[in-house]
Image (cartoon, helix red, strand yellow):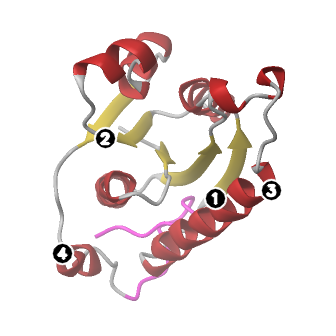
Amino acid sequence: MYKKVLLAYDGSIEGRRALREGAKLAQLCCAEVFLLAVVELSPIMSPDAGLALPIDEQTANYKAVLAEGVERLKALGFSPTSRLETGDAGQKIAEFAEEIGAHLVVVGHRPQGPLARWWFGSVGSYLVKRLRCSVLVAQTEISDDEFERLKPPNEKPASGQAGTASI
């Protein structure tokens, strides 16, 4: 089924839902896990617009978010491969998914109004159109208690699945 799962993570509530849902599926499938955070550059904040970018601060924040996501996954028995990218989130997620040959990409859903949806579009919609693998837009709320219960028993990873454990 899913042997390579890419989790897009931004540290938001929606991102944490996606991380939890993706981790749960990855455990069930004994999948290899990849974690991606993308520092998005707003068109208004681009160098072409003549505005200075606080890119160093944004990058530092996303590095911390990525490290937090890695720690959450390690607590579940995974040894995730993580990456930080800068650019358009949908494009960077799609590129990384294609690069690693992902079988499943998991993203969160942030509700937005009709005008914002029309103007900016949806990362989930973009990924469904662009990718040839499955895309899960996680919307299910899972409590922290349930997330803790997802931790695998103290077992060695299944053979051939370094860093993953089955439940």
Q: Quadrant of residue 49?
A: top right
| Residue marked by disc 2 | 110
Residue at image position (73%, 55%) is 59
**Residue 95 coordinates in the image, percent (x, y):** 65, 26
- Position of residue 86 measured from the top left corner of the image (x, y, whole percent): 72, 39
Look at the numbered disc 1 and give the secondary structure of its residue: helix
Sequence-earlier tag: 4 or 1: 1
Between the residue at mark 4 and the residue at mark 1, the CA separation in whole angstroms equals 26 Å
User: Residue at the spot x=45%, y=21% of the render?
Assistant: 127
Q: Which residues are magenta?
A: 154-167
Kind of residue sitting beneath label 3:
Asp
- Can residue 103 be seen here? yes
Measured Cα–Cα span from mark 2 to mark 1? 18 Å
Q: Residue at x 29, y 36 (%)?
A: 137
Residue 162: within the magenta?
Answer: yes
From the viewer's perspective, tell me whether residue 88 is left or right of residue 48. left
Q: Going 73% across and 63% down the picture, which residue do you hit? A: 60
Residue with the mark numbered 1: 62
**Foreground pick, 23 / 162:** 23
Secondary structure mainly formed by the magenta segment: loop
**Residue 55 spot, x, y in % from top left:** 77, 49
Count of all numbered marks drawn on residues in the image: 4
